Image (tube, rainbow, N blue to C red):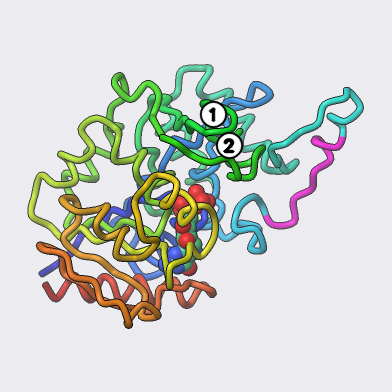
Amino acid sequence: MALENIVALVGGVGGAKLAHGLAQILPPERLTVIVNTGDDFWHYGLKICPDLDTVMYTLAGIVDRTNGWGLAGDTRAMLGAMGRFGETPWFGLGDQDIATHLLRSQALRSGETLTQVTQRLARALGIKPALLPMTDAEMPTMIETVEYGELEFQVYFVKHRWQPTVRAIRYANAESAAVSAAAATALERADAIVIAPSNPWLSIAPILAVPGMRDLLCRRDIPRVAVSPIIDGKAVKGPAAKLMSELGYGEVSARTVAAYYRGLINGYVYDERDAGQPIHEEDMQMVMFDTIMTTEGHRAVLAEKILHWIGSW
Ligand code: GDP
């Protein structure tokens, strides 16, 4: 099957890696990357979009490779200066990174949509594939915790280092949000959907919660594949495994993630390190690859394998 137009659904660090793999092997006009914006928040008057920025900096080749987010070689002088006023900053904002937030905040205040300003910033950084927020509305992820009640996402994730016990997750304002026009067009033209190995609950679920998104994804019979972020019962990084237990999904495994995506995907990629626990799901094709993307080369190899696999369906 000819797969012309590929749409990737991604969160931050894990998602950016696969988006970068796809960007390395596909002509840019054939790739659209739709990014979670549930993590977005306003801080010191700035609109901060952590996942969009992680993907943008990664695709532009300027990301801090040690952290997987933020800008390479950035400094924290502004945050240091906050101390003079008795402020104890808890969210990392690099000095150069602030340029992104300032320009975006100004654009939003002057009436541009998040899609418009994202496209403008991405183009200025030399990014050629379409990089799109899932929605132009604000639809913040809210985390109901046992210890502190409901927390804004970044307060849970960064300030409390995702240690509180999660009871439930909701997406505020979801009822009045809509898939952005550009994302909807990309999905209507898609020949295949690739869901990155991003956190299913914190990064992919918010995208799926945008009204109309699931219909757009499932409207046509095209390959819709997800890659497991859980390998050998553990998350490669971050709270995915911890959340799975806290939200009562049972066994922490790649199999549980496949079950979570039931009804949405028709193909599932899990890691060959889990070969001892083969996964079977009705209406899902399964494949095992080495999915750990430690180098830029690995990202492209995994992307290539996925596209080759779904191209053979
Ligand atoms: P965040 O928003 O920055 O937390 O990033 P994402 O949600 O996009 O990605 C986090 C998820 O990516 C975690 O659950 C990790 O287990 C997963 N992950 C990170 N790197 C890799 C990798 O190289 N391979 C696989 N399979 N999963 C990964």
Indicate the amino acid at tag 1: Glu
- Could you tell me residue 63's position as x and y percent? 61, 56
Residue stretch rendered in magenta on the structure = 72-80
- Depth order, front residue of 124/80: 80
Disc assigned to residue 156: 2
Vertical relation: 48 (above or below) 272: above
Residue 75 falls within the magenta-colored stretch: yes
* Residue 309 appears in the rendering: yes
* Residue 16 appears in the rendering: no
Q: Residue at the spot x=16%, y=69% of the render?
A: 285
Q: Are marks 2 and 1 in contact (CB under 8 Å)?
A: yes
Q: Residue furthest left?
A: 221
- Could you tell me residue 87's position as x and y percent? 82, 26
Image-based side of 148 in relation to 210, left or right: right
- Could you tell me residue 58's position as x and y percent? 54, 57
Image-based side of 280 in relation to 115, left or right: left
Which class describes the residues within 10 Å of circle 1: few (<14), some (14-19), or many (20+)? some
- Could you tell me residue 255's position as x and y percent? 29, 65
Which class describes the residues within 10 Å of circle 2: few (<14), some (14-19), or many (20+)? many
Residue 84 falls within the magenta-colored stretch: no
Q: Residue at the spot x=11%, y=72% of the render?
A: 313
Q: Which residue is mark 1?
A: 152
Disc assigned to residue 310: none
